[in-house]
Amino acid sequence: MKMNKTPYFILAVILLALNSITAQSEALTSSPYSLYGLGVINQSSIGFTNGLGYTGIGIGTDTQINNLNAANYGLIPANSFYYDVGIRGGYNTYSSSTDNESKTTLNFADLAVAFRITEGLGMGITMVPYTDVGYTLVGLETNIEGSTETFESNVSGLGGLSDLKLNIGYAVTDILRFGLSTSFLFGNIEEQEYFVISSSALSTSEETNYSGFRVGLGMQFDITDKITMGSTMQLPSSLKGNLTRTVVKYLDGSEITVEDDESDTVDDFDMPLEVGIGFSARVMESLTLSADYKKNYWSKTGQEENLGKYEDQDIVSFGAEYVNNPTSFKYADRIRYRAGFNYDNGYLAVNGIKVDSYNITAGIGLPIGQGLRSLMNLSYSYGAKGQIENILVKENYHLLTLNLSFADLWFQKRLIN
């Protein structure tokens, strides 16, 4: 019996990815909308789905990791072990009624492994950024209550939450699969605010840590050998938070510590009920079409922000993948071409205006070696969020994601000794 081991360089990449999660030394986003709530919610997923408009609920595949529906893990073949490592880089431009600026970011995108436990039963562990925080607001002027004077403040935020997820999928029959996922959401958000009033200044540093569990369900049903329907549900949950605050006052060149690492509790952050449905259809053997619809019931959480409130969110996405012949000996015939579109009407309303967004995606899957399952997945997304109106900002972004998706074979019996 032979067991192929994961290459050492992949293990090194995994360790570097884990280190980047804990370090949070560089923001994964620069969006001003990450100021709200837990930050900007990450839509990108594992490997190939990033080029398909982030569709995948109804895509049944036994050659790659599909993290968007736990039921798909029931299709993992015998003796198979999959792993995926990704990085992403973004270029963002921001426009308001008074200013324009641009920023770039580069960091960890995902880490995933998946394998078969027994016949019809598969399991996977994934780690992805769930929310990203990275904003800077400079020169904010605020009126002093009961006075005609104003004070100026600079505010910056950094951090976000990670999603460590365990997925289990079971194939009840050849055409019906169910899935269960358990997520552990954890991370911290650091905010620094610097006030200047006349000849004195005040610096406030707050670090809020959040953590909590979330449970999800999934189902996939093969209507025919070419059409698959899927559904998902993420159950509501609450994330516990605690806050550490440090306040320093500067007066006539002297530094006075007002508060030093004072701990306090913060309100739980409620996660909504999320439901989704998706379809995929194989057309002419070479073309696969996919479509997803998700609804997140944020209004049921009853949460509000200082400048807005949470409202129900609708996300519609479409994708298409073309591969001439995945089993061909010709390399060019095995290349996978992908495209997609995603529209999100937003979950936060600022001054009564919902912050919506859209993405146009494209991707390519380049085979690694002669097998069918190891790919270098390169995805590009162009999108826009918000609009130039009142205090809102129009954000345009370019996102490039690179995933190395490998397949290994374990516990194979030798044919020749």
Image (tube, rainbow, N blue to C red):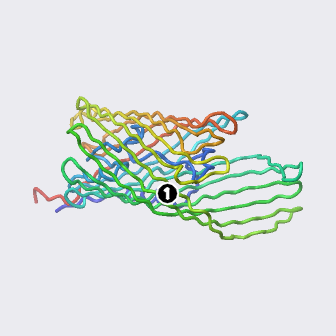
Q: Nearer the viewer, residue 139 or 270?
A: 270
The furthest residue to the left: 416
The furthest residue to the top: 284
Residue 261 position by quadrant: bottom right
Q: Is residue 45 visible?
A: yes
Residue at 45% over, 63% down: 213
270 relative to 100, above or below:
below
Image location (x, y in percent) of residue 12: 41, 58
Tell whether 335 sits left or right of 384: left
Screen quadrant of the N terminus: bottom left
Residue at 86% over, 58% down: 200
Residue at 50% over, 55% down: 271
Image location (x, y in percent) of residue 116: 25, 58
309 relative to 93, above or below:
below
258 relative to 329, above or below:
below
Q: Nearer the viewer, residue 166 or 199?
A: 166
Residue at 55% over, 48% down: 40
Q: Nearer the viewer, residue 192 or 296?
A: 296
Image location (x, y in percent) of residue 233: 39, 51
Tell whether 209 sits left or right of 65: right
Q: Residues within 10 Å of mark 1 (few under 14, many from 20)?
A: many
- Mark 1 belongs to which amino acid? Ser
Image location (x, y in percent) of residue 351: 66, 41
Tell whether 35 sits left or right of 161: right
Q: Is residue 376 visible?
A: no
The residue indicated by pointer 1 is 162
Screen quadrant of the C terminus: bottom left
Tell whether 157 sits left or right of 114: right
Give the total of numbered labels: 1
Find numbered disc 1 in the image and state the secondary structure of the residue it sits on. strand
